[in-house]
Image (cartoon, rainbow, N blue to C red):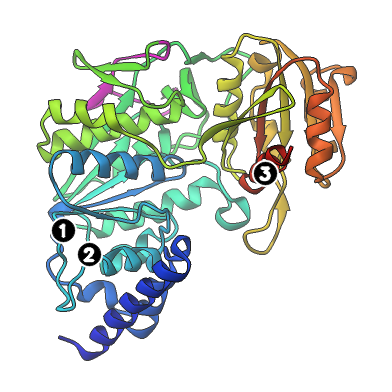
């Protein structure tokens, strides 16, 4: 065994042990960071990892949920799995996951390695670990200060795909950039596609509501006949003929009322009502078929699946039921999905919007401009008593977006503050007891804690 690798392995394991004792929720990245700093080739030196049983899941939206679902399905089928379920999806996070599944002799101990991989870091990880299966959920707008346009990420992923051999790539048939990666086909590359058919939550595209998405092949405008969720659905390019075709795995129908969906006449439990989750299910079925997991085992796995916390939650305050949908602040597609979910509620309600400054790294920026990529009409017409816009930086910008959409000023309440009590007081002042909330995770946690103090 390489002595530098052994030192890195031992140091990483000891660090992980200490963190588990002292701060159990902070061990997703640091142990792997230490291991990689000691040995830059740490990932390449772990023995016994089978590329045919190595699955990478990447893309803009749905990586974490899809990884959790695939891991749960494989474990339910009796297989052992190593994964980075906590979401640390760059090199240090991958190394941390491997530390827990590697002996002191440097040998991998699990049947499968299933990893969520940050789309920008995909090339770096693939340089050290070779996946036999690469899943691309979608390629959409996200973190503009880091990623710029989605086409930049598309080119990065395409470069990685072109460099790998003996690869099965799983592509979202309904998302144009993901599907366009099939153009990277060469000897040894197997393309498998997954899809979701038009259902009750699909939107028919009106003539006055187009998309700003160019064709990934010829860069002319794409046309959608419908969208299952924002940026995904049945599409075609008039200029070059690029289109969504027949997928290997299709979720044929979705019944949100009974929390079920069907594929090839088999009925499955839909654990979460979010439209994005249906695509995670479609990928899971697709992977299971390719890996030879029996359908009945997949059915049982979906019946018992529980997602990571914090996606859809609620709390009560002064008689108000406050429903929270977690979104990516840097992402208009998940914002649109949240708006569409709220619009499904036909009862009179309050909608409370609190986007904030994104300060993960420099440059910091506010992201209310993403609301202009969203269609607010279905939500506006669904019965909103009041719109509460809050936040010391973004409240007025959010209110302006509502005004552009035609919401009268007397229905807009502005809380020009980050004070949680002021925000809760504004919600209590509304007549309706049902509140839908969109904000960043920390603000939601602070609001919930303040509510529980009463």
Side (left or right) of 366 relative to 275: right
Residue 112: image location, x then y, percent: 17, 53
Residue 110 is marked as 1
Residue 28: image location, x then y, percent: 42, 63
Q: Residue at (67%, 58%) from the top-left corner?
A: 359
Residue 59 magenta: no
Which label lies toward us, 1 or 3? Answer: 3
Give the mark, 3 or 2, whose residue is nearer the N terminus.
2
Side (left or right) of 395 relative to 304: right
Residue 210: image location, x then y, percent: 59, 22
- Give the distance between the C-alpha atoms of the residues marked 3 and 2, in whole angstroms: 37 Å
Residue 285: image location, x then y, percent: 23, 31
Residue 255 magenta: yes
Give the mark, 1 or 3, whose residue is nearer the N terminus.
1
Tag 2–tag 1 contact (CB < 8 Å): yes
Residue ID for mark 2: 101
Tell which of 311 and 213 is nearer to you. Answer: 311
Residues in magenta?
A: 237-257
Q: Secondary structure at mark 3?
A: helix
- Give the distance between the C-alpha atoms of the residues marked 1 and 3, in whole angstroms: 40 Å
Residue ID for mark 3: 449
Q: Secondary structure at mark 1?
A: loop
């Amino acid at each position: 065994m390489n002595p530098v690798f052994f030192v890195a392995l031992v140091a990483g394991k000891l660090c992980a042990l200490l963190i588990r004792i002292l701060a159990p929720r902070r061990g997703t990245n640091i142990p792997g960071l230490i291991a990689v700093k000691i040995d830059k080739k740490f990932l390449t030196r772990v023995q016994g990892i089978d590329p045919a049983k190595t699955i990478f899941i990447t893309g803009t939206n749905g990586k974490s949920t899809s990884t959790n679902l695939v891991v749960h399905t494989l474990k339910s089928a009796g297989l052992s799995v190593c994964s980075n379920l906590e979401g640390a999806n760059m090199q240090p996070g991958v190394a941390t996951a491997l530390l827990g599944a590697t002996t002191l002799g440097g040998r991998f101990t699990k049947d499968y390695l299933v990893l969520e991989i940050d789309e920008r870091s995909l090339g770096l990880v693939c340089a050290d670990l070779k996946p036999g299966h690469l899943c691309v959920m979608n390629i959409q707008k996200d973190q503009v200060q880091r990623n710029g346009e989605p086409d930049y990420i598309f080119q990065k992923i395409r470069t990685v795909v072109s460099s790998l051999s003996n690869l099965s790539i799983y592509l979202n048939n309904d998302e144009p950039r993901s599907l366009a990666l099939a153009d990277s086909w060469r000897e040894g590359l197997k393309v498998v596609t997954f899809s979701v058919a038009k259902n009750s939550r699909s939107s028919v595209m009106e003539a006055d509501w187009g998309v700003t998405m160019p064709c990934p092949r010829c860069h002319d405008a794409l046309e959608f006949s419908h969208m299952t969720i924002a940026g995904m659905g049945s599409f075609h390019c008039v200029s070059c003929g690029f289109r969504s075709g027949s997928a290997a795995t299709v979720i044929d129908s979705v019944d949100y009322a009974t929390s079920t969906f069907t594929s090839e006449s088999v009925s499955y439990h839909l654990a979460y009502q979010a439209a994005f989750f249906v695509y995670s299910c479609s990928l899971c079925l697709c992977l299971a078929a390719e890996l030879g997991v029996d359908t009945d085992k997949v059915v049982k796995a979906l019946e018992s699946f529980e997602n990571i916390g914090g996606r859809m939650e609620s709390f009560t305050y002064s008689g108000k039921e406050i429903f929270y949908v977690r979104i990516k602040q840097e992402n208009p597609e998940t914002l649109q999905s949240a708006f569409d979910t709220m619009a499904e509620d036909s009862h009179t309600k309050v909608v409370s919007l609190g986007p904030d400054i994104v300060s993960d790294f420099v440059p910091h920026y506010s992201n209310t401009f993403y609301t202009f990529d969203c269609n607010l009409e279905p939500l506006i017409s669904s019965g909103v008593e009041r719109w509460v816009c809050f936040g010391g930086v973004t409240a007025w910008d959010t209110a302006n977006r509502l005004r552009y959409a035609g919401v009268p000023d007397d229905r807009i309440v502005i809380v020009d503050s980050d004070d949680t009590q002021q925000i809760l007081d504004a919600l209590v002042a509304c007549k309706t007891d049902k509140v839908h909330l969109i904000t960043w995770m920390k603000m939601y946690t602070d609001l919930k804690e303040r509510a529980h103090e009463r």
